[in-house]
Amino acid sequence: MRRNKLIQEKYLYFAITGGTEALLNDAGQAIQLTTSTTDPVPPGTDAYANGVFTVSVTDHDDHLWGTYYGTPVSGSSVEIHPSTIASYHVSNGTLTFSTVAADPVYGFTVSGTAGNNDYVTLQKKPIDTIDCMLYPASRMTGIQMVNATSAIVYFESVTGDVDATDQVLVTFASGKYKDFCQMLNDAISDNRRQSNVIDVADVMSGIHLNGNPAVISAVAFTLDT
C-alpha cells in the first residue's frame, strides 16, 4: 500500500535565484570568482562544462574571438563557451581562458586595457542544500497571501516535527496571486503528473510550470531545524 502511494505521489520543486557577481576591469587572461557567486566557489573542475555557472563578458573592439563566436557587436554581452575554458581552479575560483592563438575556434583573447574586460558570473544549478527544495505534494498544508506580490506555501517539515512547517516564500508580479494558486492546483490535481517531479518555480534555471503565468521572480525558504 505504501509503495502505491509513493508511485502516485507528485513532487513539487522550487529553486532560488542563482548567485551572481560582476568582475570589472580585469586585464589578465584569467578571472577569479569570489564567494559572491556561491559560497564556497562552484565545486569540481568540470563545474563550468556541466553548466553550474556561466560567465559573460562585455565585448570591446580590441577583444579577439575564435570563429565559434563570429563577430560580436561591440558593447554586447557574450557568454563564454565551455570549450573556451582552459582550466578552472576549484579551491580559489580562478578561471583561465584559452587565447585565440591557442584555440582558433573557441579562444578568447582579452583586451590589454583593464577597463575593457568586464565580466558577469551567474549560478545556473543548485550547489548548497538551501538552493532548492523538493516536497511531496501531499505534504503541502496551505498557502497564504502575504501581499499583492508574494505568498507563502506551507509544507510539513522535512525534519518530521509534527508541530512545525517549512515555508516557501514566492514572489510574483503584482496581482498574480490567483494565477500562482492556479499553478499549484494544476500541479497537484493533474493525474498525468503522478510520480513526477514538477518544476513549480525554478527561478535559478528559469523553468516554471505552465510557462510562468504568475511571472514568478524569486523564491526563498524558511525551514524548520
Image (cartoon, rainbow, N blue to C red):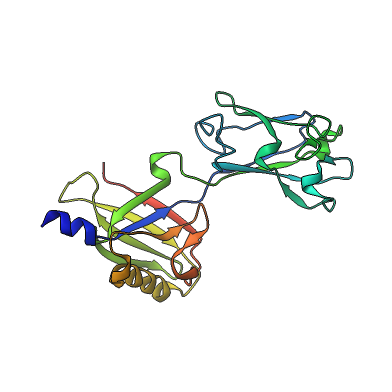
Residue 146 horizontal/vertical position (percent): 37, 65
Q: Residue at x 43, y 66 (%)?
A: 209
Residue 102 in view of the camera: yes
Residue 177, percent from left and from top: 41, 72
Residue 138 seen from this side: no
Q: How many marks?
A: 0
Quadrant of the frame with the C terminus: top left
Location of residue 29 with respect to 79 vertically, above or below: above
| Residue at position x 32%, y 61% in the image | 153
Residue at left offset 54%, top offset 41%? 52
Q: Residue at x 30, y 66 (%)?
A: 143
| 178 versus 17 height, above or below | below
Q: Is residue 120 above or below residue 113?
A: below
Is residue 191 rendered to the left or right of residue 204? left
Residue placed furthest toward the left: 1
The quadrant the N terminus occupies is bottom left
Question: For residue 200, what is the image quadrant?
Answer: bottom left
The image shows residue 83 at horizontal and vertical percentages of 68, 38
Q: Locate residue 101 relative to residue 91 in the image: left or right.
A: right
Q: Position of 39 compared to 6: left or right?
A: right
Residue toward you, 208 or 108: 108
Viewer-nearest residue: 35 or 138: 138
